[in-house]
Amino acid sequence: MKYILKTRKLKICTKEILKFFNFTTIGLAIILVIILIKYKPMYEVKMSGQKIGYIENKNEFNKDIQENIKNYKAKNVSDVELTSNPEYKLKLVNRTQKSTKRDALVAIQQETKIMYEYYDIYIDNKKIESVDTLEEAKNIKEEIKQKNDKDIKDIDIEIKENITENVDEIKTNKMEIAKENIFKQLNIIEEEKKEEERKTINGIKLATLPLQGKITSRYGQSSRLRKAEHTGLDIAATTGTPIKATAEGKIICAKYSGSYGNLVKIDHGNGVETWYGHASKILVKEGQQVKSGDIIANVGSTGNSTGPHLHFEIRINGKHINPQKCMY
């Protein structure tokens, strides 16, 4: 009898528990339905701890980041790197909340570090042009090498890569324009090298003109004032005009010397001498060392002269040569 009573009591308790569980389940379901009617699940996206928007699908959003930001390809872009990774948190938000995926992508893009590259072309350690790609720079360099010109083949050509975050720093030209500018510069360099060679005698570079002025008597000319051919150049200028040393050297003569009048001679080494005659005043002394461009005398009309001018000579191992082939 006791067993039957216990069994009935257990059944009643079980029914009560099931009844309570059913009511609880229904209640929770009703609450969930009410919540889902008013709210919906979305991912809150943060960058560096700052909320940047809401998205519905995290995987699709990561795919968009990969395709539209990390794999961003544009002119001069070499590398794209996120300064921080996005953080996601699933939340229930009001159903009126729309996805702000585009705004979130823009915010991530603003936090993206984009590196740009371009290439400078240097000739003899001087930057001449800039192009967008290494391939363009190499093509130009190869064309320069193929040019049948000894002076150009001897020129040092270097390509330097530049990496920058500042896109406004990039000042490049299209390949054809860059090539044209480079070959123009090469022609200038070639002429400058020829001019350097013209001004170099026995390894001595005569870098400075002694005087700017009108040539009144050329090398090799004869006249009623001289029996022999002219051994130098006569360059007219007003009395007192400074006369400059054409190159570094040692003063070996600084005195009055017959028809030359006041004469300065400079020994530049390797048998090369320059002479400066008819000076009104000598400003250096024998044995003094001078540099190219130093003022050594003033124009005058001393000695065998018809007016103020400089008589300029160049001698190699005692023999005079035409100064115009080297200087003027």
Image (spheres, helix red, strand yellow):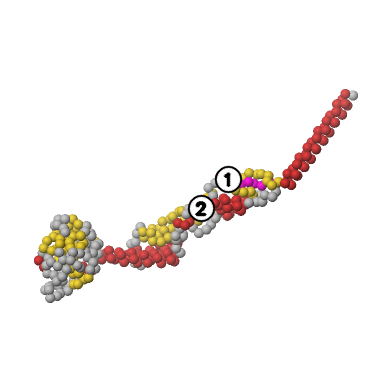
Frontmost of labels 1 and 2 is 1
User: Which quadrant of the structure image shows residue 131?
Assistant: bottom left
Residue at image coords 15%, 70%: 307
The residues bearing labels 1 and 2 have C-alpha atoms spaced at a distance of 21 Å
- Identify the residue at image location x=87%, y=25%: 3
Q: Position of residue 40 (x, y in %)?
A: 70, 47
Is there a contact, CB below 8 Å, between mark 1 and mark 2?
no
Q: What are the residue bounds of the magenta stretch?
A: 40-50
What's under tag 1, amino acid-wise? Answer: Gln
Residue farthest toward the top in the current orientation of the protein: 2
Q: Relative to the observer, which residue lies in front, 247 or 302?
A: 302
**Where is residue 259, by image quadrant?**
bottom left
Label 2 secondary element: strand
Residue 73 % position (x, y): 53, 57
Which residue is label 2 attached to? 114
Residue 131 magenta: no
Image quarter where the C terminus lies is bottom left
Q: Is residue 10 above or below residue 295?
A: above
Q: In x, y percent, where is residue 89?
A: 63, 44
Picture quadrant where residue 148 is located? bottom left
- Crowding around mark 2 (Cα neighbors within 10 Å: few <14, some 14 to 19, many 20+) is many
Q: What element does badge 1 sit on?
A: strand
Looking at the image, residue 93 sits to the left or right of residue 201; the answer is right
Q: Amino acid at mark 2?
A: Ile
In the current view of this chain or complex, which residue is farthest to the front? 239
Q: Which residue is mark 1?
A: 50
